Image (tube, grey):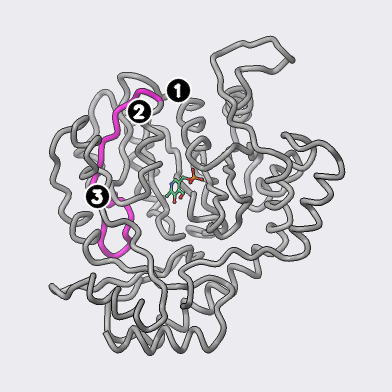
């Protein structure tokens, strides 16, 4: 079976972990600081703040932007649930706006109608490694004085008009084991704003700047040096990983004929965290997944249930109709696009997809 994802762990990662073990300093320490510096450089921002995972990164990014009870945050329903949960954790209300079926991302044209006097921020998700239309989002945000917190969990290295994901607003990244760069579990917040960086650092460490003096209610959302060592080693490979993902995606784009394939518009650089096809026109997605699986091609469904249709979200926010998200949740299938695919794997994937 060609797996949907395959983390790359080489000698550099193993050696880096052994060095941490030998140092006796397993908790957050010098490697975390180095990893933060490297990540900030990669994203073209002044600060990166490491956290325990992508969910905590988004949670702190929202808190540091002053989001809290009584506020509304506009986001997409077509995402991993953590995007919406991070808003709920602050006490704010997520307001979901439907997506553009061509990009899988929030439809900027629908945002303005969802704005109320309580709206404080937009949380766009750069799904599958493809950035949102940041010009349109920035225009609405500027017009209404809203903050932008980018869920860039799947989009490390992606660009929009030459600017990296996580450099438009406050960024939140995941370093979960299957992500384009990973540390097992881990997260990063990115920002150019000194005050937001300072607040995130304090919030992740019990509201503390000076040891055992606590200035605010904070959390333990720190990254360990063990995770940072893995992440740091991975950063050396990011450009190569991304190039390989692009080669794979270009091959699929050129050869797949049986189903709808993802489009990349001018001005966008995709990092292909996922390569996602659509099995549309009433064809059965379950049958397609079964056929691919039976023939050795691993698949993923990201995501089968849009956030607004999850039980506890419905209980909280009531019934909502977001037709595009609901339709795409029935149609999407992600194919293996990871850097460890061989030329034979690519050919096999195309052959099996074209038999659908
Ligand atoms: C779009 C999106 N948002 C948020 C998260 C949360 O990240 P983590 O799993 O590291 O908490 C993920 C990770 O899967 C994600 O894909």
Q: What element carries label 1?
A: loop
Residue 49: in magenta span: no
Q: x, y percentage for residue 108?
A: 29, 49
Label disc, if present, on residue 85 of the rendered structure: none
> Within the image, what quadrant is residue 339 found in?
bottom right
Task: Locate the C terminus by quadrant.
Answer: bottom left
Give the secondary structure at mark 3.
Answer: helix
Which circle marks residue 66 in the picture?
1
Cα distance, mark 2 to mark 3?
18 Å
Q: Quadrant of residue 266?
A: bottom left
Check residue 109 in the rendering and tell me which mark sits there, or answer none. Answer: 3
Q: Which of 73 and 326 is in front in this view?
A: 326
Q: Mark 2 points at which residue?
A: 120
| Left or right relative to 54: residue 326 | left
- Residue extending farthest right: 22
Mark 3 or 1, nearer chain start: 1
**Residue situated in front as seen by the camera: 10 or 243:** 10
Q: Is the magenta stretch mostly helix, strand or loop?
A: loop
The boundaries of the magenta stretch are: 90-109
Q: Are dots 2 and 1 in contact, CB under 8 Å?
A: yes
C-alpha gap between disc 3 and disc 1: 26 Å
Q: How crowded is mark 3: few (under 14 residues within 10 Å), some or many (20 or more)?
A: some
Residue 247 is situated, as x and y percent measured from the top left of the image, at: 54, 79
């Amino acid at each position: 079976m060609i797996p949907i994802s395959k983390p790359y762990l080489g000698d550099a990662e193993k050696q880096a972990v052994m060095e941490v073990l030998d140092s006796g300093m397993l908790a957050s320490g010098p490697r975390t600081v180095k990893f933060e510096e490297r990540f900030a450089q990669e994203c073209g921002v002044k600060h990166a703040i490491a956290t325990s995972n992508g969910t905590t990164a988004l949670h702190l990014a929202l808190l540091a932007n002053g989001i809290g009870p009584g506020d509304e945050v506009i986001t997409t329903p077509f995402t991993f649930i953590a995007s919406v949960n991070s808003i709920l954790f602050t006490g704010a209300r997520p307001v979901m706006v439907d997506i553009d079926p061509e990009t899988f991302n929030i439809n900027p044209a629908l945002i303005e109608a969802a704005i109320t006097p309580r709206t404080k921020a937009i949380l766009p998700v750069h799904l599958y490694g493809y950035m949102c239309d940041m010009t349109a989002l920035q225009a609405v945000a500027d017009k209404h004085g809203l903050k932008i917190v980018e869920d860039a969990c799947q989009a490390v290295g992606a660009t929009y008009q030459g600017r990296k994901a996580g450099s438009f607003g406050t960024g939140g990244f995941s370093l979960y084991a299957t992500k384009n760069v990973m540390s097992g579990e881990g997260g990063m917040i990115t920002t150019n704003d000194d005050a937001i960086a300072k607040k995130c650092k304090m919030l992740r460490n019990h509201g503390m700047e000076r040891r055992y003096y606590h200035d605010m209610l904070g959390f333990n959302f720190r990254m360990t040096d063990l995770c940072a060592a893995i992440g740091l080693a991975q950063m050396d490979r990011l450009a190569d990983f991304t190039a390989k993902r692009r080669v794979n995606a270009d091959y699929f784009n050129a050869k797949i004929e049986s189903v709808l394939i993802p489009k990349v518009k001018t001005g966008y650089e995709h990092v292909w965290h996922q390569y996602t096809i659509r099995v549309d026109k009433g064809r059965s997605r379950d049958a397609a997944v079964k056929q691919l699986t039976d023939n050795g091609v691993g698949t993923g469904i990201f995501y089968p249930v849009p956030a607004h249709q999850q039980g506890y979200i419905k209980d909280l926010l009531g019934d909502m109709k977001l037709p595009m998200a609901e339709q795409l949740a029935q149609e999407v299938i992600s194919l293996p696009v990871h850097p460890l695919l061989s030329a034979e794997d690519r050919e096999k994937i195309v052959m099996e997809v074209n038999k659908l």
